[in-house]
Image (spheres, rainbow, N blue to C red):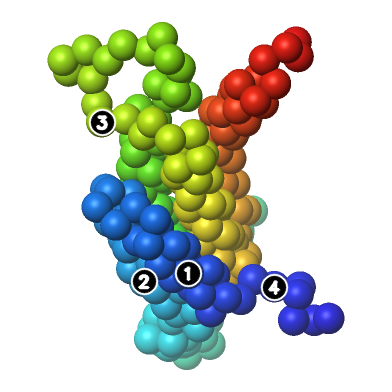
Amino acid sequence: MMHYRALNPELILATAELLQQRVSERFPDSGLRKVATELVSLAHDMAKSAKALETPIWWLRILIGIVIAGGGAVFLFVGTLLSFDRISTGAFDFVQGIEASLNTFLLAGLGFLALVRAEERIKRKRVFEELHSLRSLIHVIDMHQLTKDPAALSTNFKPTRNSPQRITNSADLARYLDYCSEMLSITGKLAALFAQSVNDDVVVDAVNSVEELGSNLSRKIWQKITMIETSGRLRSNPKTG
């Protein structure tokens, strides 16, 4: 059962590839087929990127270790090896010394924290770049379903000279829209791979926004599918309703 507690990139890739084949078989000359092919390519790239983000950035960690060791050596040198002449015993000088020491430790602590979080920032930037590509593809998918209007199935529908090419078969139109919805669902799973690989609240919020975008567009698509199904029932049973 542990197998089902995490997303498997290979299964997501297999689903995307199968969907691409289904779209190619049913709509071989459509732009949606090219979008499905691009989704498969993007899925491969994102699966590799998400896997790579699980691995620590070793060169950065080694560099941070060297910097921290060097900083510690400087503090050790200043605190133990240097000799200070004319040490004042006045209260004012004592307070100044304490203040300078506190400021030094505070700045050193902030610098240490910045170094430690450098890897987190680098990975976060990589995730944002990948999610940007995914968000763009989501809008491309939405553009392909935009002109697939169920109203075109009506006998009263009259296209204009500049009307886009329509699918006039209700079953094909419903299947086309369903493919678009499936693509949006896959994009959400690809985004979730990054939340699974990088344990970061900012990344999780970004992933959720991408998933929410796909879900909202998918709801619009299913409204169209519902209209097609309702129209089909009314045509087959004209006396109902």
Q: Can you tell which of label 2 and label 1 is closer to the viewer? A: 1
Residue position marked by numbered label 2 in the rendering: 45
Identify residue type, mark 2. Asp
Indicate the quadrant containing the N terminus: top left, top right, bottom left or bottom right.
bottom right
Residue count near mark 3 (Cα–Cα under 10 Å), binned few <14, some 14–19, many ≥20: few
Mark 4 or mark 3: name the one nearer the start of the chain: 4
Tell me how far mark 4 sits from mark 2, CA to CA: 19 Å
Which of the two discs, 4 and 3, sits closer to the camera? 3
Q: Name the residue under label 1.
A: 18
- Residue placed most toward the observer, 240 or 36: 240
Give residue 165's mark.
Answer: 3
116, above or below 157, in the image: below
Q: Earlier in the sequence, mark 1 or mark 4?
A: 4
What element does badge 2 sit on?
helix
User: In this rendering, which labeled residue sits more in front, label 1 or label 4?
Assistant: 1
Q: Is residue 162 visible?
A: yes
Q: Three-letter amino acid code at disc 3?
A: Gln
